[in-house]
Structure formats: structure tokens, C-alpha cells
Image (cartoon, rainbow, N blue to C red):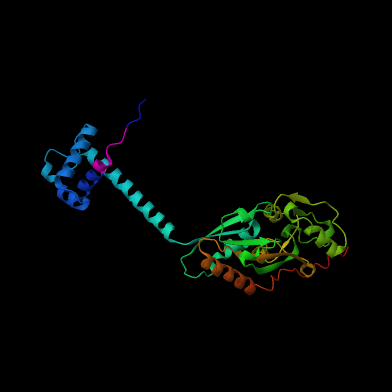
Amino acid sequence: MTKRRLPPVKSLIALEGVVRTGSVSAAAQELAVTHGAVSKQIAHLEEWMGRPMFGERRRGMIATAAGERLAAAVGEALTLIERALEEVGVQECQAVLTVAAPATFAMRWLIPCLPALEVAGGDVGIRVRPTHTTEDWDALDCDLVVRRLETLPERLSPRPLFVEELGLLVPPSLAETMDARTLPFVDAATRTGELSRWCRHAFGEMPARPPKVYPHFYVALEAALAGRGAIVGPVQILRPQLETGALVEPWAALRVPGARYSVGVNPDGRHPDAANALATAMVRHWRLMAGGPAAALDGLGDPRSI
């Protein structure tokens, strides 16, 4: 079956203009062409369609039902095109920073905090690119990079952001457990050693049951939030979950230090000045948040007690 071709675009635009303005002259003036050119395009369209677009009394330019329907469709299409052009124009004019950051940090802290981070100019867009531990972040096209554990190269002018405090975070359904060693645990393959380090610090040995290990921390975190087990995690990043009671920290006094985070600006990025302003705002915001959430529960005792 042969695909039907569309009528000439010029003819469609001429039809829409005449129907909307009510006259050939007005449409011609709007389109910056002659009266005859518009009439010619209407004739071409009627020939192509095989039916009239206007009634016999041409002076009034009263469209037929077919002419009205087609003109309305063309008008809708032109409106969509106009909106798309405006959106593309705004996107091209607006500075957009790409921030590469560890996935959990990006999802749990950076994205929720973006409205509070002031960037010079006020019209800078921010695109967050979550990264995973195994990814080659240095190959990513980004303006700003946040890294956990890794040392950023000097060319990025790195500055310290914060050092994690790792605490034992427990879903409310398990919060009454008096002995942490009997808790079910969840862990992440990308944070090897953190659970065992907290346990050895807390009671000198590993828990009674081996943890359920997930490939990424943010997956293990969802399991903890679903009540599957306790998790050792960074209390600063998970402050909202502690403040809302989605997780509790029964033994806040037994936190251990975790990884160091740093932020760097790509000097070859598209908007280095705006990226530097964002990095400064992030450091400032962390300092304002310093002190950690008061999420400890009273009366649960020491996890080493039996």
C-alpha cells in the first residue's frame, strides 16, 4: 500500500491563516506574501484534496466543514511547534551544570537539597548524574564531581566536603531488640567492611547471623526501610529517614568514622564559574548541617549487653 503524501506545507499554512483571519488579504499581510500567492496556495490545496476549502461565495471566505477541520489541525500543529521552539530556545540559553555524584549521596542528599543551594545567576539548571562504585567517573562529561573514598586529581581543585559517621540504623519494627548481635542485617557489596567494623567496635565480634548482601548501598537501604534488617550507614546522608522515624539509631554513641567525600570542579567544563559557585554552596550547606541528627532512642541500652 502506497503511503499517502501530505499536502504542501505552504498551502496548509495559507489555509490556516485565511480561516483564522477571515480574509485572503489579512493572511497575505501576516505571511508577508502577495494576495495572489495565498489564493494560489488555497487553489493548490483544493486540487490536492479534491474538494473545496471554502464556500462558493469567496468574498466572505466562509470555510467548509473540511476547511474548518483542516485549518484547526494545522493551528494545533503550529502551536505545538511554537512551544517546542520556545523550550529549545530556553534550554540552549540556560546554563546547565552536570554533577556526577555517588548514587546514594545524589538521591538522598544532593537532589533533595538542590532548592536550598544558591548558584550565582539564579538561572542555572542542574543535571545530576548518579554514579556507581565500579564506574569510571573520570570518563564522564561533567562540570562538577563528588567522590567518596577516592582522591580527586589536583586539576579539579578538590575541596573536602565531609567525613561520614557510620551508625547502626534500624527499622522501627526491629527497634525493640536489646542485643544488636541478634538483629538481622543487610549490607552492600560496594561498602565492604563497614558492617563488620561497626560490629567489632560495638561488641568485638560479628553478629550471630550473616547479613543479606545487596549489590549497591541504595538497594540495601530500601531493604532496611522495608524492615528486612538493620544497616550500617552514613547518618548525615540519611538524616531525613532518621528525623521522620523511617529508621532509628538505638546506639548513636557507637558511631565509627567512614569515608571522606570531596568535591571538584572540572576546569574544562562548560560553566566552570557556576560549577565553582555550586561547589562552594555545597560545602557551606554541609557546614550548616554539622552536628548530626539526634536520632538515638532512650532506654535501649548498650548493644553489648545481653
Report which quarter residue 58 is drawn in: top left
Left-right relation of 60 to 107 = left
Residue 249 seen in this snapshot: no
Judge whether 3 appears above or below 26 on screen.
above
The x and y percentages for residue 211 are 79, 52
Percent from the top left, x then y, of residue 117?
55, 69
The foreground one among 141 and 302 is 141
Which quadrant of the view contains residue 277? bottom right
Q: Position of residue 241 (x, y in %)?
A: 66, 62
* Residue situated in front as seen by the camera: 204 or 33: 33
Seen as rendered, the residue at the extreme top is 1
Whole-percent x, y for residue 268 in the image: 55, 61
Res 146 → quadrant: bottom right
**Residue drawn where x is 67% and y is 54% of the image:** 218
Residue at 59% from the left image edge and 54% from the top image edge: 140
Foreground pick, 298 / 31: 31
How many marks the image carries: the answer is 0
The stretch drawn in magenta includes residue 11:
yes
Q: Is residue 67 at all visible to an observer of this figure?
A: yes
What are the residue bounds of the magenta stretch?
Answer: 5-12
| Residue 123 is inside the magenta segment | no
Q: Which quarter of the image is occupied by the N terminus?
A: top left
- From the image, which quarter does the C terminus lie in? bottom right
